[in-house]
């Protein structure tokens, strides 16, 4: 008695295509998350009376290699000393200070749910 295995064949084909499709979509999800974190960090700096100008130095880079995707987000050293001043704004210097802007971990945490939802949407679109 022959069995209808067409759905099993469809599932097998979907699973074989799953990895490349997800791998192709993940860099875009990471890029969007990095952009959102950048915007939050810029907003935090713009709200600072003394460090507002550092907002324009915040940038991000996304790199993908060997199946890994990373984003580096923060003040760019080549943009007007932003990195040194941001360090003082976040953590202070030899003369004290710090906490002039929210810790950058806040921007990362605030993006967590959006990032997770984007990954779920990516997976839903593949399956």
Image: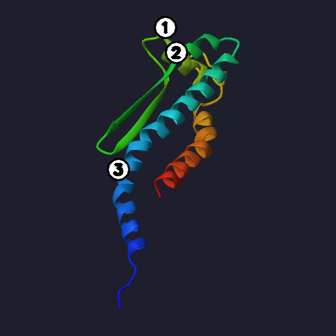
Residue 4 % position (x, y) = 40, 80
**Quadrant placement of the N terminus:** bottom left
Q: Which residue is mark 1?
A: 80
Furthest toward the left, the residue is 66
Q: Earlier in the sequence, mark 1 or mark 3?
A: 3
Q: Which residue is mark 3?
A: 20
In this rendering, the label closer to the viewer, 1 or 3 = 3
Furthest toward the front, the residue is 1
Residue at 61% x, 21% y is 42
68 to the left or right of 111: left
The CA span between labels 2 and 1 is: 7 Å
* Along the viewing direction, whichever of 62 and 81 lies nearer the viewer: 62
Q: Is residue 29 above or below residue 103?
A: below
- Classify mark 2: helix, strand or loop: helix
Residue at 62% x, 28% y is 40
Q: Earlier in the sequence, mark 3 or mark 2?
A: 3
Residue 68 % position (x, y) = 35, 43
């Amino acid at each position: 008695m022959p069995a209808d295995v067409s759905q099993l064949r469809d599932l097998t084909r979907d699973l074989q295509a799953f990895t490349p499709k997800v791998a192709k979509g993940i860099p875009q999800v990471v890029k969007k998350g990095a952009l959102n974190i950048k915007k939050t960090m810029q907003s935090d700096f713009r709200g600072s009376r003394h460090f507002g100008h550092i907002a324009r130095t915040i940038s991000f880079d996304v790199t993908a290699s060997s199946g890994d995707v990373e984003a580096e987000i923060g003040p760019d050293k080549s943009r007007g000393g932003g990195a040194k001043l941001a360090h003082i704004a976040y953590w202070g210097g030899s003369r004290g200070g710090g906490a002039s802007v929210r810790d950058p971990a806040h921007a990362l945490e605030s993006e967590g749910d959006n990032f997770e939802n984007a990954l779920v949407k990516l997976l839903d679109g593949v399956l």
